[in-house]
Image (cartoon, rainbow, N blue to C red):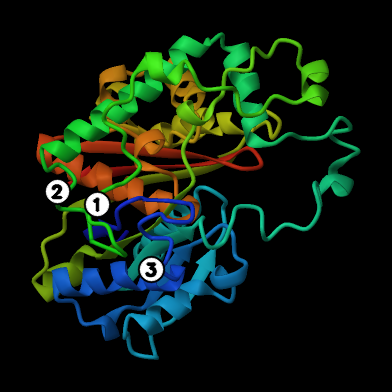
Amino acid sequence: MTSAVIVDAVRTPSGKGKSGGGLSEVHPATLLSGVLSSLVERTGIDPALVDDVIGGCVTQAGEQAGNISRTAVLAAGFPEAVPATTVDRQCGSSQQAAHFAAQGVMAGAYDIAIACGVESMSRAPMFSNIQGKDPNRGPIAHRYPDGLVQQGISAEVISARWKFDRTALDEFAARSHQLAAATAASGGFDNELVPAGSISADETIRPSTTVEGLAGLKPAFVDAEFKARFPEIEWSITPGNSSPLTDGASAALIMSEEKAAQLGMKPRARFHSFAVTGDDPLLMLTAVIPATRKVLARAGLSINDIDVYEVNEAFAPVPLVWAHELGADPAKLNPRGGAIALGHPLGASGTRILTTMLNHLEQTGGHYGLMTMCEAGGLANATIIERL
């Protein structure tokens, strides 16, 4: 089968997803067009050669509606003949876009594709595309009579059932900021960042974060209804040990190894294995565990063969429960910090993490990288790449 390779990958800095954030004045299609243009500038690729652009976006409403990927392709000046589509697998949308792009190359349907993603949480607020408190309750009420819960409650349930106390969560959150700050200070992010809006560096990283400071934050999801339903919850999830609202975009240029050779381009990594799976939609965030087991089995690798693990830090208990269940080396887990520090611009997070993981492998001489992302509804994607 044809190999799918990554020729380049870029991202915007993470902007605070609120009014006054460094990217809040930028239309999301403009954010996305910026990383598309950057791929062209950095690689010299003729955009007319791109067979498809597959973008991830979660809140497809307002400025993010109407196939934002196509809008961004046109805004970037690509030929009108270059198509684009927008996918939604919730937080894993652009990771899924990368799967679709790479799998299209491997199947021979594409020679060249771009996987990308965008989310402006300041301009298209989360849940603004949803009508009503629980619009999908009816069709699944027979199966889940007590109803499902929002992700913050799922994070609380996971923390309680796996016995991660508030201190453990805050220690992990502080670690995320410390690692991200150290990477930024050493120039570790420089090769992946494309200036956008008014910023050229991540504005979500807080280098001064301490466990003591985080301890003063109040739990964010306390709810009387859920107190009765889940008496084991200790209410430990706060804004400090969760990912912040974030604006951002990211993109990866993917092609067949043969096409890269024809064009004289040097691939940076090869897609090795893919997996996607579902899990308990009440716990919701734990599907990263079976997704990882599935992708490792497909790859014929063990967790110890992997040089870096990127597990999206939607909430601190997610990477903690993943590491506990997989027996993973904590030193290899999100070594440049994760979404708690670097932000979680929903639809852009998949290719953002892919970009950061690729640069880490190159800068440390690692061979295999594994990334996985929890997604609403109890879903998760997992990807293994191989540095070339």
Q: Name the residue type under label 3.
A: Leu
Local SS, label 3: helix
Residue at horizontal 27%, vertical 37%? 369
Residue denoted by label 2: 388
Q: Position of residue 149 (x, y in %)?
A: 73, 34
**Image position of 241 with respect to 35: above or below:** above
**Image position of 207 with respect to 130: above or below:** above
Q: Split into 4 quadrants, where in the image is the N terminus? A: bottom left
The disc label shown at residue 270, or none:
1
Q: Name the residue type under label 2.
A: Leu
Q: Quadrant of residue 39?
A: bottom left
Q: Name the residue type under label 1.
A: Arg
Q: Nearer the viewer, mark 3 or mark 2?
A: 3
Q: CA distance from mark 2 to mark 1?
A: 7 Å
Q: CA distance from mark 3 to mark 2?
A: 27 Å
10 Å neighbourhood of mark 2: few (<14), some, or many (≥20)?
some
The disc label shown at residue 32, or none:
3
Q: Position of residue 110 (x, y in %)?
A: 36, 73
**Image position of 55 with respect to 388: above or below:** below
Task: Identify which residue, 289 or 69, lies in the foreground.
Answer: 69
- Horizontal placement of 139 versus 241: left or right? right
**Image position of 153 with respect to 49: above or below:** above
Mark 2 and mark 1 in contact? Answer it, CB < 8 Å: yes
Q: Quadrant of residue 59?
A: bottom right
Residue 272 seen by the camera: no
Local SS, label 2: loop
